[in-house]
């Protein structure tokens, strides 16, 4: 039997991280209380500390930086292709 993957809302993740950031409790105890894996909560904490409110975009949404990078890579590939076409055209004309 395979376990079904659990999806958590952004609000749940943010609240879990805020509880984990409290100095009075350990990450392990917060994870156990919430019924989530310790390493999952550590990853959520790291992501939250890096991105603050932009963390956890959800539903396959990517971070804006990743989208911009992908667009630039596509544009770069297109420009290289155009350059190569122009080079071939010039070599045929000459």
Image: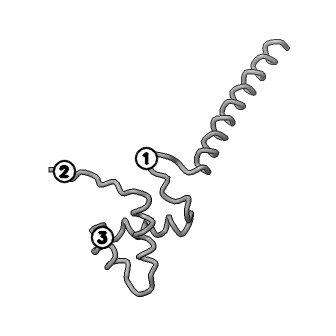
Quadrant in the rendering for residue 75:
top right
Residue at horizontal 44%, vertical 71%? 17
Q: Earlier in the sequence, mark 1 or mark 2?
A: 2
Percent of width and height locating residue 5: 28, 52
Percent of width and height locating residue 9: 39, 56
Is the residue 6 above or below the residue 19 in the image? above
Alpha carbons under labels 3 and 1: distance apart:
22 Å
Residue ID for mark 3: 34
Alpha carbons under labels 3 and 2: distance apart:
22 Å
Residue at horizontal 40%, vertical 70%? 16
Marks 3 and 2: which is nearer the front? 3
10 Å crowding of disc 1: few (<14), some (14-19), many (20+): few
10 Å crowding of disc 2: few (<14), some (14-19), many (20+): few
Decide if residue 57 is on the left or right side of residue 1.
right
Alpha carbons under labels 1 and 2: distance apart:
22 Å
Residue ID for mark 1: 59
Q: Residue furthest left?
A: 1
Q: Nearer the viewer, residue 38 or 82?
A: 38
Residue ID for mark 2: 2
Q: Earlier in the sequence, mark 3 or mark 2?
A: 2
Local SS, label 1:
loop
Q: Nearer the viewer, residue 10 or 94?
A: 10
Decide if residue 20 is on the left or right side of residue 4.
right
Percent of width and height locating residue 56: 48, 57
The image's colouring method is one colour
Q: Nearer the viewer, residue 17 or 62?
A: 17
Residue at horizontal 45%, vertical 51%? 58
Q: Earlier in the sequence, mark 3 or mark 1?
A: 3
């Amino acid at each position: 039997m395979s376990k079904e993957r659990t999806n958590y809302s952004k609000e749940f993740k943010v609240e879990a991280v805020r509880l984990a950031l409290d100095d009075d409790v350990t990450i392990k105890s917060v994870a156990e209380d919430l019924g989530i894996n310790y390493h999952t909560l550590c990853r959520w904490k790291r992501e939250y500390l890096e991105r603050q409110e932009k963390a956890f975009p959800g539903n396959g949404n990517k971070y804006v930086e990743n989208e911009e990078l992908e667009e630039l890579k596509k544009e770069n590939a297109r420009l290289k292709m155009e350059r190569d076409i122009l080079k071939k055209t010039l070599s045929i004309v000459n």
